[in-house]
Amino acid sequence: MLSIIKRLLILSLYAGGSFCYVNMAHSQIWIEERQRAELPASLVSSQRMKLVLTHGNQLGGQTSAEVVGGQIISGHYFITSDTLQTISINLISNQDDADISLTKFTMKYKGQTYKTFPATGLPSPGNGEEVFIGFTATIKQNALEGERLPSYILDVNEE
């Protein structure tokens, strides 16, 4: 009986001695979507087409699709952080529409234009900064008609 009590005592010492205090800092980034990117309506073709959406709500010069209506709106976001640490921003296509691929992302952040992602070493948004997103949407030949909503990920991290 003494042996069992001794083992329990030793076990409780190991368990009790395994607690330690770790000082950890936490920070947060908030992303608010103010406007989802919108592509204009275009005619379906038997050829591959491109819609180039700039971060300034315009169609880029490489657009080859025949636009027939709708709005041209770049993605608009507002990001904030509770620290002054530098950040990185990455833009990634979700590849959620088999007929449309999103590539060649562009971003305007703090007055600068970025075309390579992830963009690293960016200044903190602090109390808030506007972010505008553009991209090239390539529509495969003989794509199905109808409203399409391809999406992407805006990934913001403190470094």
Image (cartoon, rainbow, N blue to C red):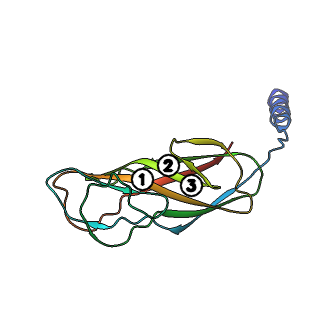
| Residue that extends furthest to the bottom in the rendered view of this protein | 70
Left or right of residue 141, residue 6 in this image: right
Residue 54 coordinates in the image, percent (x, y): 44, 57
Give me the disc on residue 26: none
Residue 81 coordinates in the image, percent (x, y): 71, 57
Q: Amino acid at mark 1?
A: Phe
Left or right of residue 57, residue 77 in this image: right
- At 13% across and 54% down in the image, what residue appears? 46
Q: Quadrant of the N terminus?
A: top right
Left or right of residue 154, residue 13 in this image: right
User: Image quadrant of residue 12?
Assistant: top right
Q: Which residue is mark 3?
A: 108
Question: Contact (CB < 8 A) between labels 1 and 3?
Answer: no
The local crowd at label 1, few if under 14, some if 14 to 19, many if 20 or more residues have their Cα within 10 Å, is: many
Residue 10 coordinates in the image, percent (x, y): 84, 29
**What is the secondary structure assignment of the residue under circle 1?**
strand
Q: Amino acid at mark 2?
A: Leu
Q: Amino acid at mark 3?
A: Lys
Query: Of the residues tagged 2 and 1, which is closer to the observer?
Result: 1
Q: Which residue is mark 1?
A: 135
In the image, residue 37 above or below residue 158: below
Question: Contact (CB < 8 A) between labels 2 and 1?
Answer: yes
Q: Which residue is mark 2?
A: 91
C-alpha span from label 3 to label 2 = 12 Å
Query: Of the residues tagged 3 and 2, which is closer to the observer?
Result: 3
Q: Could you tell which of marks 1 and 3 lies nearer the N-terminus?
A: 3
- At 76% across and 57% down in the image, what residue appears? 82
Left or right of residue 128, residue 48 in this image: left
| Residue that extends furthest to the top in the rendered view of this protein | 3
Q: Could you tell which of marks 2 and 1 lies nearer the N-terminus?
A: 2
